[in-house]
Image (tube, coloured by chain):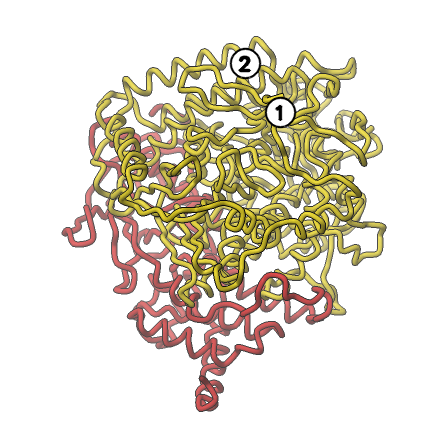
Chain colours: A red, B yellow
Amino acid sequence: MSAGTTDSSMRVTLKVWRQAGPDAPGRMVTYHLADVSPDMSFLEMLDVLNERLVEEGQEPVAFDHDCREGICGACSLVIDGQAHGPEDQTTVCQLHMRHYHDGATIQVEPWRANAFPIVRDLICDRSAFDRIIAAGGFVSTHAGAAPDANAMPIAKDTAELAMDAAACIGCGACVAACPNAAAMLFTAAKVSHLALLPQGQAERHRRVVAMVEAMDAEGFGNCTNHYECMAACPKGIHVDHIARMNREYLGASLLSRDLG
Amino acid sequence: MTDMLDAKAPGGPIETRWDRHRFDLKLVNPANKRKFHVLVVGTGLAGASAASTLAELGYAVTVFCIQDSPRRAHSIAAQGGINAAKNYPNDGDSVYRLFYDTVKGGDFRSRESNVYRLAQVSNHIIDQCAAQGVPFAREYGGVLANRSFGGAQVSRTFYARGQTGQQLLLGAYSAMMRQVGAGRVKLHARREMLDVVLVDGVARGVVCRNLTTGACERYAGDAVVLCTGGYGNVFYLSTNAKACNVTAAWRAHKRGAFFANPCYTQIHPTCIPVSGAYQSKLTLMSESLRNDGRVWVPKRKNDSRRPADIPDEERDYYLERRYPSFGNLVPRDVASRAAKERCDAGFGVGATGLAVYLDFRDAIRRDGEGTIRGKYGNLFQMYEKITAEDPYREPMRIFPAVHYTMGGLWVDYNLESTVPGLFVLGEANFSDHGANRLGASALMQGLADGYFVLPYTIGQHFAGRSLPKVATDDADFAAAEKSALERTDRILAVRGRRSVESFHRALGRVMWDDCGMARSAGGLEHAIERIQELRAEFWENVRITGDADALNQDLEHAGRVADFLEFAELLAVDALHRSESCGGHFREESQTEEGEARRRDDEFSYVGAWEFRGVGEASTLHKEPLSFEYVKPTQRSYK
């Protein structure tokens, strides 16, 4: 494609993980791209590669993506060993090629964790996250039962802190970045969001126990305080939430006799 | 007349229509609810809220989503907020005012009964979301914060930072996942609906592609609920997510669901301009920026000075000039057309000349950089990430982009399409926004449909119709699966030379040039010809690699583009037949001397609902006449 070339167009060498299916062997495959515009996003650069592959009769590289504005959490690439690549608090779809130099060699791999099995190429199965939420990441209310929204005042600071935790996009970078492939930051973000708010109090103990059990059942590792999760998180979710979840869990465990 | 559609909207005083209608609707005995099985396609705000609420009521629900997780539906990308008539700020809002503003904002092309109901349930939505733990913005006293949005004269918009859609969706998703955990909702992710199955004329099932394995799957139920979003990606470049498509709606249309007002598309005025031909999507900058930003272009053509070097008297603040009373806060369609007008006249800025400035200089001087950072920090950061320019120092460059589609499958007051048992919710239906949607109203409509409308109206279908048992090995299911598989095989068999992506891009170009912000008979006729040519070429020359029986994103995309190539023609035909200007639909032949849109109520005060007659065959137009008993139609004026 001769598109959008500028004076500063770049050449890059990509080494991309290709794997035909969950049980197929995978390998790194090298591709050379000329005419990469610094204004392209990383995913647009992969689009250009894929369009070329199709024209050459080769199968394009499969990768998850959707909103391309950093909010849906679909994109999930490990770039040169870093989940979502080198930019701070940035998903791959918001990473632009201007952060690379002409002639760069870039390695692209999927999330790697036992609980996120590879589906194909750079796509993995993150449904374990949905099951953790299904175990308790909600307030049990039903449509029609709610009191007036202002009947329950919530201090601004509390609401802001809950929002900080609720900002999680469920991408799984925390798991990909963790040497133990732990899902603590993801789980803690939801536990923390709801534990901070008055709406979440009624099920507070049951929730944390159920979610932590679900997390363990999915085969995620344990937290050993590396904080790589926080460094990789595109939404800047803080490890303080893990500390809060641990406190919640301890408190709930002491009360476990009361849990039905 | 057989040509008229029955909306089943109740008459009488508008304030009590929904209450009376709810009373008249049949109820399903609580013990019987679990015997009815609802198939919900899509898990955005409409789908997730419908699935969770139906399960709470006791129905058996199966839900499908195209992404790997229901939490990723495109509702998640909505930034600005959600409207409700709470009147918490005590500034004169009411259900009636929200109703009035929405009918007027929709340029008198929506159904009054529906819009009034939407305004009524808006307040319950906020209560419901707050109860779920949605972290709305709050005042220091702990009450919910509101802001004015999209030109509304009252502050009725609730928000959660710049991530309102995300937080509302996560609320609906968590409610649905609770039901998944309880076994009352069955969830199938990475599925794409390829057909609706009709048995004796009633929607009784769907056929899906399992996107992971490539397998075709059949599901049977007692009702089908489509919550599959809008068709903005027919323009290729839009603010929609990449997976947004018309496939589910289009295939339902081919099975008998009428498609209403496809020409009503919303072009959002504040998006980051295109930077190159590789561009894969456009990013919206929230409309809230127009509360403090001033829109301008240089008074001199091709002025290549840096914006900061252009003195005030050489700047044309064209929105303030043309619309002194609303200024920078005119509705989206008006702001978009005004930007296009300036750029077409040669005053556009940036490398392509297809951009205008959105300048915060005066707001920063007035309120200080800290205040502006507090209000818009995340948006400024997003802009800087994409453009590598600092909007605190340089004005943003913005240009309109396709954002939302008001048209969709025709539904009656019960949200039921012309196919019995097929309900359509959210952006996928045509119902509440008329010819133009107001800011912060999409989230409201999606959740209204799912939490508070469908759960009542679907009972009428179950209690009022006889629904004999069906099974997935019935002939109708086999036939639907066969036709879905044949279409896939046909695409793979072309073995041409041109990529799907390039067809999609070419289609988008045609649509943007001739069916975009301004449309003319000549342009639309040209578009129809080009669409037909592109469609013919697609079936002769598209190249797909890989097979049908595995994950194949290229093949998925091909199926969607094939449907867009059919749907696009209907959009253009609808735009051609509607030779008036209204809302987001601007016909060059129908404008005032000052270049403003001229609506023609005598001829076009109706919903245009199209019946499918075959690909390449002329569709049949059915009309639902619109009457306005409460809000008197006037030409909108924002001067």
In the shown orientation, is residue A124 left or right of residue B26? left
Instruction: Give how far across and how far down residue B80 sits, in percent.
Output: 64, 48
Foreground of the two, B404 or B579: B579
Q: Earlier in the sequence, mark 2 or mark 1?
A: 1
In the rendered view, would you say A10 is above or below A100?
A: above
| Up/down of A93 relative to B566, above or below | below
Q: Which of these two is toward me, B206 or A243?
A: B206
SS for callout 1: loop
What amino acid does circle 1 point to? Answer: Met
The nearer-to-camera label among 2 and 1 is 1
In the image, taking residue B392 as reference, residue A122 lies left or right, namely left
What label does residue B4 carry, if any? 1
Residue positioned most to the left = A25
Can residue B378 be seen by looking at this rendering?
A: no
Chain letter of the residue carrying label 1: B
Q: Quadrant location of the N terminus of chain A?
A: top left
Q: Is residue A127 shown left or right of residue B349? A: left
Q: Image quadrant for the C terminus of chain A?
A: bottom left
Residue B58 in percent (x, y) is at 49, 62
Left or right position of A42 against B633: left
Q: Secondary structure at mark 2?
A: helix
Q: Would residue B251 be seen by someone viewing this image from the given angle?
A: yes
Q: Quick one: A99 or B329, which is closer to the camera?
A: B329
Give me the C-alpha separation between circle 2 and circle 1: 26 Å
Tag shown at residue B524? 2
Chain identity of mark 2: B
- Tag 2–tag 1 contact (CB < 8 Å): no
